[in-house]
Image (tube, helix red, strand yellow):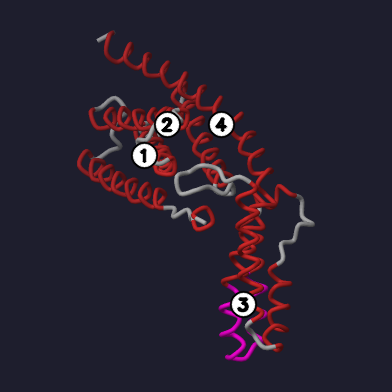
Amino acid sequence: MATARYRYSNSELWMAFFTNLAITALYLAVVWRLGSVPKASAFFGHSLGILGFLLMLMTETLYSLRKRTRSARWGRMATWLKFHIYTGLVGPYMVLLHTSWKFGGLAGVVMLLTVILVISGFIGRYIYTAVPRTPEGAEVEARDLARAIEAAETDLQRWLAQRPPETRQLARRLIELSELRTEARTPLLVLGRRLMEWQYRLRMWQEKRRMDQAARAQAAQLERLLARRRALRRQMASLAMARRLLGLWHTVHIPLGMALFTLAFIHIAAALYYATLLR
């Protein structure tokens, strides 16, 4: 099933990191050449602001347009989301450098909203990745997850049936460790899933340390089956909550974006008026 094999690669985060690293190197070279921080109204600072704002505008509009155009075939939703995240990290960083590290007045409010929006974007991405999706970016339905869980359970039982009794006894301990602890509040299955997985891996590692070499070889095969089964069960358990959290996040993130761009356009109009038209 393509759904369960889909993984988030974080490639857009690395691309944004290296792009911002290159922009930082260029910025430092200009600082060294000028002997001071470039002014926001100077050519370099102005260029950073324009390019950064254009990237932020693309972040705000292009992914939303693609998502609302159901009949469109120009690119997968997952690819557009990666582009959305990439521009949403590079654009604000360029705007930050444009400020010349002065945050007074309206420009300071715009920068503060930008930082809040970027942080909100990271939270949204984290919740988004908790909702199982196809490689095209479409949400997976509960019935598809149920079928995948059934297939994973069948694979596990087939593996156990082919093993001797002592291996099955070992397997029971590992299966018990892999069971999802649903006594925690449901939102933790979404917001605390990384911590829960680290705790699980730590318990599994401690258990395997007590085994001899032959048992570890068997445990390695079993662990791959259990990891698949556990991931699917977690997705099923958190599916509804992840969708609710994502909906709640949208009610906060979208108005923040609208407020930011309203103030940004006012800031741009004021900058053009005072810096250009009054000269």
Callout 3 amino acid: Trp
Residue 98 in the image, given as x and y percentages of width and height: 34, 32
* Residue under pointer 4: 253
Q: Is 46 contained in the magenta span? A: no
* Residue under pointer 3: 159
Residue 199 drawn above or below residue 81: below
Callout 2 amino acid: Arg
Between the residue at mark 1 and the residue at mark 3, the CA separation in whole angstroms equals 40 Å
Of the image marks 4 and 1, the number of the one nearer the N terminus = 1
Of the image marks 2 and 3, the number of the one nearer the N terminus = 2
Compared across the picture, whether 264 is left or right of 122 comes to: left
In magenta, the rendered stretch is 201-223
* Residue under pointer 2: 66
Residue 62, visible in the rendered structure? yes
Of the image marks 1 and 3, the number of the one nearer the N terminus = 1
Q: Quadrant of residue 30?
A: top left
* Residue under pointer 1: 75
